[in-house]
Amino acid sequence: MQLARVLGSAISTVKHPSLEGRRLLVVQPVMADRRSADGDPQLAIDTVAAANGDLVVITSDGAMLRGLLGSDTTPARWSTVALVDAPALPHRN
């Protein structure tokens, strides 16, 4: 699992049947500081009704996603699993 910031959504006129009716988000994985990018933006299946700018938890758990989509052949890799709504706790040494 990883923190990511929602950058927007993706629209596709043609997509794999397992993705029909699913909202695709463009998310930017972020580091623990919640600001620094951690790799390239990714497409994620939205399961939490996230909005642009939201901080979410994403997962690449393939078995969970295949079950959610009802497809053993889905090309999807990432999905949202939680909205992060509270600020980070201060780090203590």
Image (cartoon, helix red, strand yellow):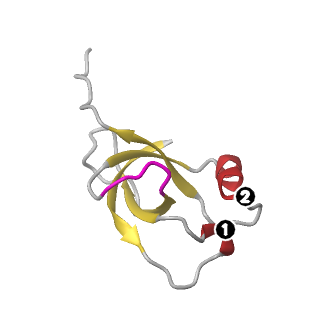
Amino acid type at mark 2 = Gly
Q: Is residue 32 magenta?
A: no
Q: Residue furthest bottom?
A: 13
Q: Is residue 48 magenta?
A: yes
Q: Is residue 85 left or right of residue 26?
A: left
Q: Is residue 85 left or right of residue 78?
A: left
Q: Earlier in the sequence, mark 1 or mark 2?
A: 1
Magenta segment, which residues? 46-51
At horizontal 34% and vertical 38% (from top left) the residue drawn is 84
Q: Would you name the residue on which mark 1 appears? A: 18
Instruction: Please state which of residues 27 and 66 is positioned toward the viewer in this rendering.
Output: 66
| Dominant secondary structure of the residues highlighted in magenta in the image | loop
| CA–CA distance in space, label 1 to label 2 | 7 Å
- Tell me the element at label 1: helix
The answer to the question of whether label 1 and label 2 lie on touching residues, with beta carbons closer than 8 A, is yes
Q: Residue furthest top?
A: 93
At horizontal 32% and vertical 56% (from top left) the residue drawn is 51
Q: Quadrant of residue 78?
A: bottom right
Instruction: Please state which of residues 89 and 52 is positioned toward the viewer in this rendering.
Output: 52
Quadrant in the picture for the C terminus? top left
Q: Is residue 49 above or below residue 3?
A: below
Amino acid type at mark 1 = Ser
Report the number of discs.
2
Q: Residue furthest right?
A: 72
Q: Quadrant of residue 83?
A: top left
Q: Is residue 65 above or below residue 40?
A: above
Q: Would you name the residue on which mark 2 appears? A: 70
At horizontal 25% and vertical 16% (from top left) the residue drawn is 92
**Residue 21 placed where, x, y %?**
56, 68
